Image (cartoon, coloured by chain):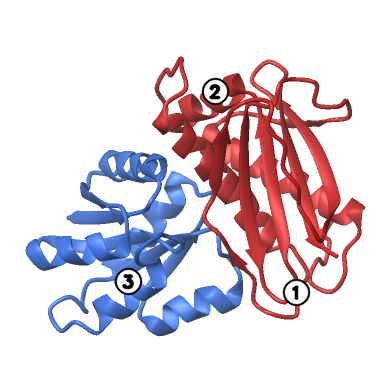
Chain colours: A red, B blue
Amino acid sequence: MECNMKETFSVKDISYQIDSVVRDIFMTMLANEITSCQEEFNGSVEVSVFLGIGGKKKYTVVIETDEKFAIKVASAMLMEEINEWSEAVSDAFGELANMIAGNIKSKLPSETELSLSLPTVIKGKSYTYSTPKMKEIAKMCFKSFDNQKMLIKLFEEV
Amino acid sequence: MKILVVDDSKTMRVIVSRIMKELGYEVGEASNGREAIDILKSDSSYSLVMADWNMPEMNGYDMVLNIKSDDNLKKIPIIMLTTENEISNVQKAINAGASDFITKPFKKETIQEKITKLINGV
């Protein structure tokens, strides 16, 4: 199925595109399969990455997961065993998010050129965030590494 | 052949450098465009630069402009490594003097193919 995202897009279209982008990145850069999941992300959100996409219209990509998933991502990308949180894990998960957001950006409709911010990685528990003047247009759960989950949210300027 | 890998992400530098070494190249690393230019000015043995687009301090595009306006460095080919796969951005880098581009995610074979193409002047 080929979707033309440049003219107009629906939640179904963008969800399809995000799914395709994430599968491709995991397969190519992590040599690991990932699948989308219907169930809610019920783990503890311990790591979040925020990336802004700016242009005539603005978007925010938020990727959330637990510490274990981020460590697995870093281990797969760096091809070395990592067992605890470190700067290397933060950098690797931020880079993964950067690739995901960059590829989502290229699928978004825009009358002008869009630019992508550098990733901001937050590590911690029990924090809240808000995205004023934006609405959530996609929310997708993925599982990999023995059913561990990662959540991707896309917000669009209202 | 010595290649300078320029990316603000240490993870990406590790991945690209590992691929380059597997392909038999010697590798140096820089974490942004400014650092890359300093390295190129102090070490004339580099034959190719592979650079990210989106970096702090000096991004890939500004780095291309700087290298291509320097008489001592302008002959060094540059391949952009980027998630910015839209035609306008790619064209911008090519117009500024970049030789080619590779979009992330990438395969080892793609990198090999692009370098071979550059070396052979195809």
Q: Secondary structure at mark 1?
A: loop
| Location of residue B11 in the rendering, given as x and y in whole percent from the top left corner | 40, 39
Circles 1 and 2 on the same chain: yes
Local packing at callout 3 (Cα closer than 10 Å; few below 14, some 14-19, many 20+) is: many
Q: Which residue is mark 2?
A: A72
Q: Is residue A55 above or below residue A25?
A: below
Query: Mark 1 belongs to which subunit?
Result: A
What type is the residue that disc 1 sits on? Ser
Residue B114 occupies which quadrant of the picture? bottom left
Mark 3–mark 2 Cα distance, whole angstroms, equals: 33 Å
Asked if labels 2 and 3 touch by Cβ distance under 8 angstroms, the answer is no
For image coordinates 85% across by 65% down, the residue present is A158
Circles 1 and 3 on the same chain: no
What type is the residue that disc 3 sits on? Met
Query: Mark 3 belongs to which subunit?
Result: B
Is residue B122 visible in the rendered image? The answer is no
For image coordinates 54% across by 74% down, the residue present is B89
Mark 1–mark 2 Cα distance, whole angstroms, equals: 35 Å
In screen coordinates, is B101 left or right of A46?
left
Q: Is residue A102 above or below residue B14?
A: below
Image quarter (top left, top right, bottom left or bottom right) of the N terminus of chain B: bottom left
Q: Nearer the viewer, residue B17 or A119?
A: A119
Give the label on residue B54, or none: none
| Location of residue B78 in the rendering, given as x and y in whole percent from the top left corner | 32, 68
Q: Secondary structure at mark 3?
A: helix
Q: Nearer the viewer, residue A23 or A9?
A: A9
For image coordinates 31% across by 53% down, the residue present is B31
In screen coordinates, is A43 left or right of B60?
right
What type is the residue that disc 2 sits on? Lys
Give the label on residue B63, or none: 3
Asked if labels 2 and 1 touch by Cβ distance under 8 angstroms, the answer is no
Q: Which residue is mark 1?
A: A110
